[in-house]
Image (cartoon, coloured by chain):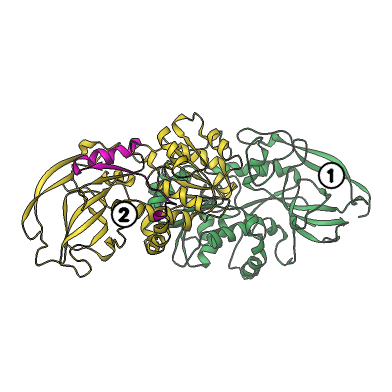
Chain colours: A yellow, B green
Amino acid sequence: MGSEEVSNKQVIFKDYVVGVPKESDMELITSKIILKVPEDSTGILLKNLYLSCDPYMSGRMRKNRGPTYVETFQPGSPITGFGVVKVVDSRHPNFKTGDLLWGMTGWEEYSLISSPSPDMFFKIEHTDVPLSYYTGILGMPGITAYGGFYELASPKKGDRVYVSAASGAVGQIVGQLAKLTGCYVVGSAGSKEKVDLLKSKFGFDEAFNYKEEEDLDAALKRYFPEGIDIYFENVGGKMLEAVLSNMRVKGRIAVCGMISQYNLEQPEGVHNLFHITTKRIRMEGFIAREYYHLYPKYLEMILPNIKEGKISYVEDVAEGLESAPSALIGLYSGRNVGKQLVVVARD
Amino acid sequence: MGSEEVSNKQVIFKDYVVGVPKESDMELITSKIILKVPEDSTGILLKNLYLSCDPYMSGRMRKNRGPTYVETFQPGSPITGFGVVKVVDSRHPNFKTGDLLWGMTGWEEYSLISSPSPDMFFKIEHTDVPLSYYTGILGMPGITAYGGFYELASPKKGDRVYVSAASGAVGQIVGQLAKLTGCYVVGSAGSKEKVDLLKSKFGFDEAFNYKEEEDLDAALKRYFPEGIDIYFENVGGKMLEAVLSNMRVKGRIAVCGMISQYNLEQPEGVHNLFHITTKRIRMEGFIAREYYHLYPKYLEMILPNIKEGKISYVEDVAEGLESAPSALIGLYSGRNVGKQLVVVARD
């Protein structure tokens, strides 16, 4: 590649957002970039291959949102997020040209990271699986599912497990891990197509379309007449309220996300938290980062399962950086079927 | 005492309650009782000395309240609850006449327990402290404070601890345990008198009257500019919401009770539960019973502290069974100052 200047398409974050983000909150521009790390830096120059669209990202579009675990986007700068990248040039001792990595990168064709911290990227060692999986089952969503389910929710054989947003990037993994553990697993999703996937592809014992249930409490009672041991929480609000009423004594709620609430001006109130005491429920939040140290152990477990076809992963692939804003926004209406990602380049 | 028949005043639960319970939901009657266990039973006959008024009891007055950890009162039968009792007669191998016990008894002068389960009562071995303490710091509220704070909330020196309903039966113990552990401790209560107690008697670092705070969030920010590590939750509702906004990363919420919500037709909604994820909060419910096995260890720790005056306990003592309904109802408006109990007899 050398040091030639090339054009660099970028998805720019325009300005802070209130309410549901829209495609027009982002803008595609084309700038120029020299494909060489400046001599006075220890940076790396990345070619972005696959970009991950994740629900938490709308939070990064808001101003003054109080303490959180990830910084707000900078108006005028590219969106950033997890992605699979190839090192095009490096002046950093930990990375060399040709390395495949996954980690935090920019929504653009090429990104210059001036001073990459060593823990910002994971090196991709296994390429006999789809590279795009490193935005999903082999990346942050995978660690999220693994850590949240095995470490936080303390599952055991026979536990009754409920997963909301179950066909999403994390939910589909959690459901399959729960089946591997010998649990009874029920998932909910927002369309017939997704519900079919849960049962036919991911092996959930039961699944339902929450949009077709007038009474979520009744739906949960139908699938969990004896109650829920583990709830893997991805949606929040009214669903959480219905779940609390159906939890079993000593149940565990792994609070991964609350996508139904992210873009509301006033999130829904949950009125029955006293179940937490009467049923001695443990409700605990977590983020993937806390389980990064388990990544090697997770890979060792999940890779053979993927290769042997015992675990499936469904992706919703948007082609080209141009489609990235629409792909991201689609998450908040549940338009994606499976893990939403964007292909910028395939190698 | 022998087998003579004596009169037995009783506080009868009249009928299921909706909303805030009233004194008139209970009625004082006088019946007769023979002070001898029938020959064909393995029961015990108890003289009730001190009765405990506890916030959870209003829940027992409601019909159809779903799964819970303690049964509903029977209309037409006496209220039941924790108390300190003396064995008057026994046909049970574990109990003998003259034994002092604490455990579940009736709101009456004498109670016949036909088949006491061995774990229904704890034997009182130490009588060089006020016997009434076995309704409080040496009884269920003591184990609640100890288990909830040390076992569930994982405190360490320097932690910033917030206790609501802090002058109550459990709160005053938690605050003092937290001080023993080297924590910074702030309590809230509902009157100037209680706030003064927290600071002057129980050694809280700071205390405030929540009724005088227009903005609970601002009040918490004043006392916890760097946030809260441990919240010992006794009240629920809006207070919990304000606390969630002020929790620190990896904070713990020990959900002991939610007295502000017990008697509402529709409990308040909590709208900011997503802090549980962003700040990786652990929120966990518990009841005293789970920590009963720690009682000997707790006594070993707390008794010397009480005798040396390092831990204080304030009781609000109502005289006579006649005063029991009013004493119980007073809990729900915060009329009691300290642990509310009723003296039926002193020996």
Q: Which chain's residue wears label 1?
A: B
Is label 1 in a helix, a strand or a loop?
strand
Task: Between residue A347 and residue B284, name the one nearer to us.
Answer: A347
- Left or right: A56, with B282 as reference point: left
Quarter of the image for residue B302 reads bottom right
**Residue ID at (23%, 68%):** A94
Q: Is residue A204 magenta?
A: no
Q: Amino acid at mark 2?
A: Tyr
Q: Which residues are magenta?
A: A306-335
Q: Residue, x 29% and y 61% (percent of image)?
A: A124
Can residue B219 be seen?
no
Mark 1 — residue? Answer: B8
- Please say whether residue B133 is visible from this viewpoint: yes
- Whether residue B108 sits left or right of residue A227 in the image: it is right
Q: Position of residue A346 (x, y in %)?
A: 22, 50
Q: Nearer the viewer, residue A63 or A75?
A: A75
Residue B197 position (above or below residue B271): below
**Looking at the rendering, in which quadrant would you find the N terminus of chain B?**
bottom right
Amino acid type, label 1:
Asn
Q: Identify the residue at the far left of this view.
A: A4
Q: Position of residue A133 (x, y in %)?
A: 32, 52
Residue highlighted by disc 2: A134
- Percent x, y for residue B265? 56, 33
Residue B326 against residue B227 in the figure, above or below: above
Which mark lies nearer to you, 1 or 2? 2
**Residue that lies at the very extreme toward the front in this rendered image:** A308
Residue A329 falls within the magenta-colored stretch: yes
Q: Chain of mark 2?
A: A
Same subunit: marks 1 and 2: no
Residue in the picture at 75% in, 42% down: B322
Quadrant of image for the C terminus of chain B? bottom right
